[in-house]
Image (cartoon, rainbow, N blue to C red):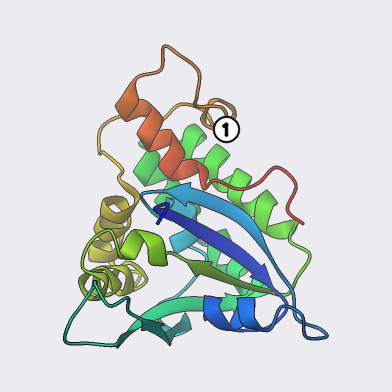
Amino acid sequence: MANRAYLLNTSVLTSNPFALARDLDKPGNSYAEVAEASYAIPIPWFFCFKADDLQMVTVELDEDEDEDEEAIEVGLPCTTVAKAIENMSQALPHFEAIAGDPALGKAYWQHAMDALKALPLPYLTMNPLEIMFMVDPLDYAEEMAQAFEGDAAAIAQIKNLAGYTDGIAPYAPDVAGGVHGAGLDDVHRANSVALHGGFHASPH
């Protein structure tokens, strides 16, 4: 596995990535990877969804992953893009608090808002399965569900799952979009990546 997560813009309301891939050649079915991340789920993705957006997805296990189970069920979120934009519109205070600087927080929030408003298809979901299977996927699914609850514990869990370190200011979003340059502090850079969201420049 490549240990990556994907934010998907879809033509059908489902959180099942296997169904999306299986039905891609059917009329009216399409999806696009509009953001991606490595080893962690970016902070903006969590604020697109609420706890009641979780749908159970059956994941078939490889023979060498668990000798006692053939499949597990994990909750993955999906919602309309319109609802994701509404959810994100309410998240500005969280971005400001997490960034530790109102201007930086607002800049990252606006970046996420602009990316969501540019999406062409009506629905949104995420596929974090590769990252979930880096650890115990059922434990990770529980932690991810907590992150959508909207309380103080959820914010702490969001930062944990995004790999965000408190007290370290991120770089500005334009720097975060090109974090491969030399001379950048690793922790500042990691926080920038966590807040940036990995949105593609031109979703399609």
Residue sitting at x 62%, y 76%: 21
Residue sitting at x 78%, y 85%: 26
Question: Residue 92's x, y, as percent?
Answer: 50, 52
Residue sitting at x 28%, y 88%: 70
Horizontal side of residue 12 vs 140, given as left or right? right
Whether 184 is drawn above or below 12: the answer is above
- Give the quadrant of the C terminus: bottom right
**Quarter location, residue 56:** bottom left
Residue sitting at x 54%, y 45%: 198
Whether 177 is drawn above or below 12: the answer is above
Question: Residue 187's x, y, as percent?
Answer: 30, 29
Question: Residue 73's x, y, as percent?
Answer: 33, 86
Foreground: 126 or 151? Answer: 126
Q: Report the residue marked by disc 1.
A: 177
Whether 104 is drawn above or below 181: the answer is below
Q: Callout 1: 10 Å neighbours few (<14), some, many (20+)?
A: some
Task: Say what amino acid the circle numbered 1 marks.
Answer: Gly
Tell me if residue 47 can be seen. Answer: yes
